[in-house]
């Protein structure tokens, strides 16, 4: 080999044996200890906030309130649950709430699909970023402000009426349609974002391949985009549906005299001072969500999430 | 239809992205039944040309003719060309058979017939038993074949292939090259093949267009491109070349202009007839079937030399040896300066 001049090597100091280093060495050799350190705090918090709160709600639903003293009796009883399931008021309100939540979800999906498609597949990178911010921006404003803004928009002589009057339309006024409009507005970002993310995961080459094989745009959307987007649509619908199920403020502000399940919970906790009955009512949306998620699972949508 | 009608004719084709001319006034005829390769580094415009032919991009100016018909402004679904994509673009929610049958389904072919034809297409790529699987359950090479079957089952006039072998490992790539060539012969249709791999282009093609900066730098048969490159770019992009600039040509070769010589045309040994330059071997790289040597000429000019390993002598450590690098004047190729 041709002789090369010897390269002077700089001396690299060995790391010192500090305590921190010893701990690092110990942790690097013990994966389970590492995992424990990582997860103990969040698990403690999850356990406290999620499990304890939910379990106590469950338990409270099987207690009762002494009608004379207003004291909560911790004796097990099915009375509240039976009342909630068989009472015609609760049945009517449950149906109304589910109906509102379903309509809100459908409206949101119908609006979100073209917006998300434009964001993911049509807009350039710069416009895409601007649109993501635009979609997120309403979340920076207070829920109450937005709900009252819609109250003003839909009021007599409000912007809505001013807009549709020339075409012979009129404001829906306060009631369930106003509630659906307002809730659909409030939850729209939560539906757009998962669908947008889902569309981002559909490679453009798949759309091109479909077109290349002879499919027109509508066909490509139906047979390629929609099936691949299904999990994302379900994910978005879970947000809008579950958030609508639990809402009681919007319906108070724009819903006129209508009551949803949340209102019943609210009045039973506050005015009626019947926490066990409120807990029993609160079990209804939980039950509905379990049914909804099971149905979503059946479609196979959750497997691809 | 006369045989003189080219399968594809591009006239003054230009595509601009912002201020960049991706394709710059391209004129090109591709004959029917030809295996045509577009070779070039990334960003040279070859893929854009393919996408313009497929209809995924619309040209800024110029026309695309398919078998004599102007299809410039037609949508991809309205053109008798099909594409095999670089990432295969198989539909992940459909089975392999559904993927292959998709083009027939879209054309309204009855279910029974389209499944039969799709099955036959799958069998022709040796995947007859894989129809019920999902694309995610296949290997890269198998996906590649499904993509081929899907694109050819609809009987296109021209098949466009966008670096279809890029993601495969070497052994599989070589095997697929042979299969592609056989497929093209049996279908008898035009294949337009985009690649940055010069060896692949040389192996497969009837003709090659070497792309650089949105223009065709050279157009010819593999032998023409390799043996008689016309520019320094082609000489160094296709294979390896020893380039001599004008002064080096004058001093070392006694020739004017820019010249090049392929490494395998140079022999190392005692002084010989023709051009024979004293040199020192500086590096010996053993490549199995051949050995690549770097030699330094007296003036400091370095040459790459390729020797076939015909005897076990080739493994000798010859660094530092004084030799003569000899080659025939006829093997020196004159290039047009860039």
Image (cartoon, coloured by chain):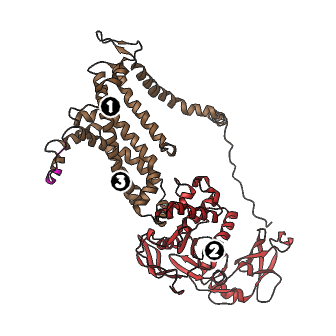
Q: Residue at x 60, y 84 (%)?
A: B230
Give how far across and how far down residue B301 sits, in percent: 69, 78
The residue positioned 59% from the left and 70% from the top of the image is: B196
Q: Residue placed farthest to the top in the image?
A: A68
Residues A179 and B128: in front is B128
The colour chain B appears in is red
Display colour for chain A: brown
Q: Is residue A24 above or below residue B88?
A: above
Q: Does A235 sit left or right of A171 as displayed?
A: right
Q: Is residue A184 above or below residue A251?
A: below
Q: Which residue is mark 3?
A: A115
Where residue B217 sits in the image (x, y, percent)? 55, 80
**Earlier along the polypeptide chain: callout 3 or callout 1?**
1
Left or right: A243 in relation to B278:
left
On the image, which quarter does residue B77 sit in?
A: bottom left
Asked if residue A124 shows in the view, the reply is: no
Task: Kindly state the secondary structure of the residue where label 1 is placed.
Answer: helix
Q: Which residue is mark 2?
A: B186
* Residue A238 rendering spot, x and y as whole percentages: 40, 40
Chain letter of mark 3 equals A
Q: Nearer the viewer, mark 3 or mark 2?
A: 2
């Amino acid at each position: 080999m041709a002789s090369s001049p010897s390269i002077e090597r700089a001396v690299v100091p060995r790391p010192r044996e500090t305590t921190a280093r010893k701990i690092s060495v110990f942790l690097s050799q013990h994966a389970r200890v590492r995992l424990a350190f990582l997860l103990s705090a969040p698990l403690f918090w999850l356990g406290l906030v999620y499990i304890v709160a939910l379990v106590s709600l469950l338990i409270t639903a099987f207690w009762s309130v002494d009608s004379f003293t207003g004291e909560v009796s911790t004796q097990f009883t099915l009375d509240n649950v039976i009342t909630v399931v068989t009472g015609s008021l609760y049945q009517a309100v449950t149906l109304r709430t589910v109906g509102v939540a379903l309509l809100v979800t459908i409206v949101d999906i119908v609006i979100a699909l073209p917006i998300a498609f434009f964001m993911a597949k049509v807009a350039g990178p710069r416009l895409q970023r601007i649109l993501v911010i635009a979609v997120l921006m309403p979340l920076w404003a207070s829920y109450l402000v937005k709900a009252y803004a819609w109250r003003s928009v839909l009021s007599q002589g409000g912007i809505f009426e001013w807009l549709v009057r020339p075409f012979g339309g009129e404001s829906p006024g306060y009631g369930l349609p106003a509630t659906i409009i307002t809730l659909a507005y409030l939850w729209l970002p939560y539906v757009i974002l998962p669908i947008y993310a889902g569309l981002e995961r559909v490679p453009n080459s798949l759309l091109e391949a479909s077109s290349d094989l002879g499919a027109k745009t509508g066909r490509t959307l139906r047979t390629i985009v929609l099936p691949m987007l299904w999990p994302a649509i379900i994910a978005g619908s879970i947000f809008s549906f579950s958030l609508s199920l639990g809402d009681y403020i919007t319906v108070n502000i724009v819903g006129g005299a209508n009551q949803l399940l949340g209102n019943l919970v609210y009045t039973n906790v506050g005015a009626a001072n019947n926490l066990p009955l409120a807990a029993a009512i609160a079990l209804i949306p939980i039950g509905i969500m379990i049914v909804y998620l099971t149905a979503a699972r059946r479609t196979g949508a959750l497997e691809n999430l | 239809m006369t045989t003189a009608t080219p399968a594809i004719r591009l006239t003054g084709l230009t595509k601009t992205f912002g201020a960049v001319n991706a394709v710059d006034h391209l004129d090109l005829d591709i004959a029917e039944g030809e295996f045509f390769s577009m070779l070039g580094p990334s960003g040279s415009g070859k893929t854009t040309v393919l996408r313009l032919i497929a209809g995924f991009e619309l040209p800024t100016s110029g026309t695309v003719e398919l078998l004599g018909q102007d299809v410039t402004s037609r949508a991809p679904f309205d053109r008798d060309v099909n594409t095999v994509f670089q990432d295969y673009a198989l539909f992940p929610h459909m089975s392999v058979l559904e993927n292959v049958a998709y083009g027939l389904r879209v054309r309204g072919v009855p279910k029974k017939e389209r499944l039969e034809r799709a099955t036959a297409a799958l069998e022709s790529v040796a995947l007859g038993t894989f129809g019920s699987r999902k694309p995610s359950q296949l290997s890269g090479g198998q996906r590649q074949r499904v993509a081929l079957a899907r694109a050819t089952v609809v009987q296109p006039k021209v098949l466009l292939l966008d670096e279809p072998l890029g993601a495969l490992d070497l052994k599989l790539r070589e095997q697929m090259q042979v299969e592609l060539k056989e497929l093209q012969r049996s279908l008898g249709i035009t294949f337009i093949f985009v690649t940055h791999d010069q060896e692949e282009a040389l192996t497969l093609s009837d003709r090659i267009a070497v792309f650089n900066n949105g223009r065709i730098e050279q157009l010819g048969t593999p032998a023409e491109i390799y043996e008689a490159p016309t520019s320094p770019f082609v000489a160094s992009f296709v294979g390896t070349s020893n380039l001599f600039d004008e002064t080096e040509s004058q001093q070392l070769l006694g020739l004017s202009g820019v010249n090049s010589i392929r490494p395998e045309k140079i022999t190392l040994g005692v002084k010989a007839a023709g051009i024979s330059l004293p040199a020192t071997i500086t590096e010996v790289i053993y490549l199995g079937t051949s050995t690549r040597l770097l030699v330094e000429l007296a003036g400091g000019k370095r040459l790459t030399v390729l020797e076939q390993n015909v005897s076990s002598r080739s493994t000798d450590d010859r660094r530092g040896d004084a030799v003569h690098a000899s080659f025939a004047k006829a093997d020196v190729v004159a290039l047009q300066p860039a």
